[in-house]
Image: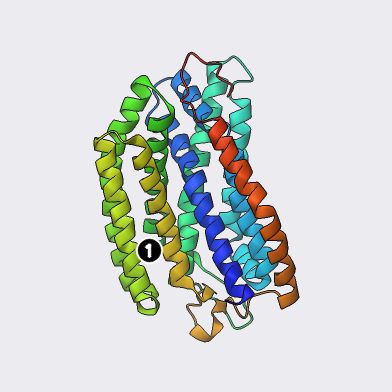
Amino acid sequence: MELNELWFVLIAVLFIGFFFLEGFDFGVGMSTRLLARTQKERTIMVNTIGPFWDANEVWLLTGGGAIFAAFPHWYATMFSGYYLPLLAVLLCLIGRGVSFEFRRKVDNPRWTNTWDWVIFFGSLLPPFLLGVLFTSMLRGMPIKADMNMNAGFTDFINIYSLWGGLTVTLLCFLHGLNFLTLKTVGEIRQRAAALAKKVVLAVLGALVVFVALSWGMTDIFKVRLVTELVLVVLIVLAYGVSSVSIIKKQEGLAFTMSGLGLAFTVLAIFAGLFPRVMVSSINKAFDLTVYNASSGPYSLKIMTIVALTILPFVLGYTIWSYYVFRKRVTDKEHLTY
């Protein structure tokens, strides 16, 4: 495997890690309005992700940084062509992070309620917009021979990208509900489990439609038929097991399976792209690939050495933080957020 191919795999791993970890953060943020009934319950939910959300977002920042360093042409085309959606994602994440800190700084229900709404929309819009971004990349965007992308409204917003955004949002919502069943007690835990039973059915339906749309509107099943079919089976199995686990109250397994479902979905997108990083809807000769969009061999070599040196420490810190904050959050504890 060449270094540019290796870095495509590493970037895929970073985005898989982001959606697995930040996915339940987004789901919990959505649940603060769709599940919680009082501000106290919303505070409990926010505290379940309090020790993790900022570290989880680092996976997205690292993924963007890796694209910049390893594939500068990909970075330039994507971040300029998707400037407004990515700016919206950034503003949502900033607002969400600020809300976690500000919501309880003033003892006023209106103040807290305002920031709670920011948490909700800051958790709802990023997975939707990122779903739209990745699925529109998969379908193809008007990229010219000079690697510039001049896209119109319908290139960004169409039935495929909108359904992709909706599907990713549902996957994150289910993942967050499963996380709440692991981290809470009492009524919140029971309501999260009850809602998860309904949402998992919506997830399976959304995935069936998404696969059908992908078959007809992209070429991923043409270029990676066996791989994509295997991943589709794995995705359905993951959410099938998650559904059964929710019913049997096997909360850890349900959470793991919804996370794997998200991971396999992101993997299917990257597998369908490879060796491309962005698909041109104008001419296949204008596709950006891991070969024509990458940095030089020396840069990739240095990046690989640094990444392999730092990665064990990052993974160790992440595992340790989840171990330390493994207990359930109750209303009897000091609620920090």
> Where is residue 336 drawn, in percent x and y?
59, 21
Query: Crowdedness of circle 1 by 10 Å Cα count: few (<14), some, many (20+)?
Result: many
* Residue occupying the point 64% across, 20% down: 105
Asked whether the viewer can see residue 56, the reply is yes
Q: Is residue 116 left or right of residue 217?
A: right
Spot the residue most to the bottom.
285
Q: Is residue 244 left or right of residue 13?
A: left
Tag 1 residue: 160
Depth check: give the residue in front, 153 or 268: 268
> Where is residue 79 drawn, in percent x and y?
62, 63
* Residue occupying the point 41% across, 48% down: 259
Q: Is residue 239 left or right of residue 108?
A: left
The residue type indicated by label 1 comes to: Tyr
Quarter containing the C terminus? top right
> Where is residue 78 drawn, in percent x and y?
59, 66
> Where is residue 136 drawn, in percent x and y?
46, 65
Q: Is residue 140 left or right of residue 148?
A: left
Residue 194 to residue 134: above or below? above
Task: Place residue 306 in its image quadrant.
Answer: bottom right
